[in-house]
Image: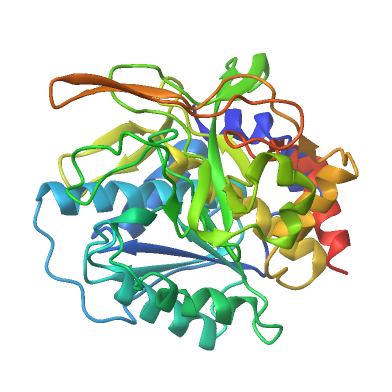
Amino acid sequence: YVPAQIRAAYFLNPLLRSGVNGKGQSIVIVDSFGSPTIAHDLRVFDRQFKLAAPAALQVIHPAGPIPAFKPTSTRLAWAAETTLDVEWAHVMAPRARIVLVETPTSENEGTSGFPQIVTAEKYVIAHHLGGVISQSFGATEETFPKGTLRPLRGAYLAAAQPAHNITVVSASGDAGATDYRLNESSFYTKPVTSWPASDPLVTSVGGLDLRLDHLGRRTAPDRVWNDGSGSPSAGGGGLSVIFGRPAYQNSDAAIVGAHRGVPDISLSASCRHPVAIYQSFVGKGWQIICGTSEATPIFAGIVALADQVAGHSLGPINGDLYQLAAAHAAGIVDITRGNNTVSFFQNGTTHTVLGWDAVPGYDLSSGLGTVNARWFVRELADLAK
């Protein structure tokens, strides 16, 4: 998919025509290492799709200098991730300023990277650099050594304080009801979920499969993203083993029990219907890419539009999302098709990790559903007034 299709699919064009385009807002995007060519690549992307340039693209390294770029698999993966995050947040909020926060250590499950991410995000918060922070990374909760996850929450606790009032969004994961073990190559054979998406102060963004024609009109209802191919490739969702049920999920206690359930909201992520990015850090040219790493910056851009309408950043929005869904607001669109059950071959055995079906109301594969931005942006902004 290209920007015009995704904008049409989320009914963004009436907002853009009315001047709701992110002007005056800043989206903070956090990635390990970043991309050495992101400024150039964004200009090419904008020129190809006739997009307005962002108000500014600022790249900062508050946790330390970035090692010189080498085309290793790790650096290439993070550079592609960065490109996706920046280009697609920009698609949704084309006049917003983008602050790309690059950190010097790879985020590798619960073993490395998060201390630097926390340092960087605390800097962003203390210096009021943006109203929404977008994180397309995550680590399975079980991979954190006991007692080490909660001390890493400092940035989210700070973001939620009235003095800062910053919205934090994070990808729910790309392996359906499972996720990676510590070795980052094999999967848990039981349901697991990932942090920071599982944090009650973070909005967890799950994945959907959108079937669109060339104009961005739906040819079938949205479904939970689940490619069903021999390795897990589906929208993450499930129950936290670290965090208890937050108050905003009390009405969904029959589904989440005593646990924090994820995701909260879901957007386009399917690898059967990926999006285009442009990169020049290795080779030159266009690529396709997918996952909840796509859905997250798309949603961050929509939040920035709501920030503009409200005239200020919205802070933690999960309570507002659940309130809108309970009121059957037009901006929240329920998803009732698909599931995030996955099967995969590992250590000589085929494993199936049972996930959850999308059903009317909240569920652990699509969350509350998806958004119609034409209505959602103003509804969310109104709740914050």
Q: Is residue 299 left or right of residue 310?
A: left
In the image, residue 49 sits, relative to residue 262, either above or below, namely above
Image coords of residue 166 (percent x, y): 63, 73
Total marks in image: 0
Image coords of residue 10 (percent x, y): 69, 35
In the image, residue 83 sits, relative to residue 175, either above or below, namely below
Residue pictured at 67% horizontal, 30% vertical? 8
Q: Quadrant of the C terminus?
A: bottom right
Q: Farthest top residue?
A: 219
Q: Name which quarter of the figure residue 260 lies in.
A: bottom right
Q: Closer to the camera, 9 or 285?
A: 9
Residue pictured at 13% horizontal, 46% vertical? 73
In the image, residue 313 sits, relative to residue 335, either above or below, namely below
Image coords of residue 248 (percent x, y): 75, 57
Q: Is residue 322 left or right of residue 149?
A: right
Residue pictured at 22% horizontal, 62% vertical? 106
Residue pictured at 76% horizontal, 27% vertical? 360
Report the colour scheme: rainbow
In the image, residue 106 sits, relative to residue 212, either above or below, namely below
Q: Name which quarter of the figure residue 20 lies in.
A: bottom right
Q: Is residue 370 left or right of residue 196?
A: right
Would residue 58 be visible to someone looking at this image?
Answer: yes
Would residue 19 be visible to someone looking at this image?
Answer: no
Image coords of residue 295 (percent x, y): 52, 42
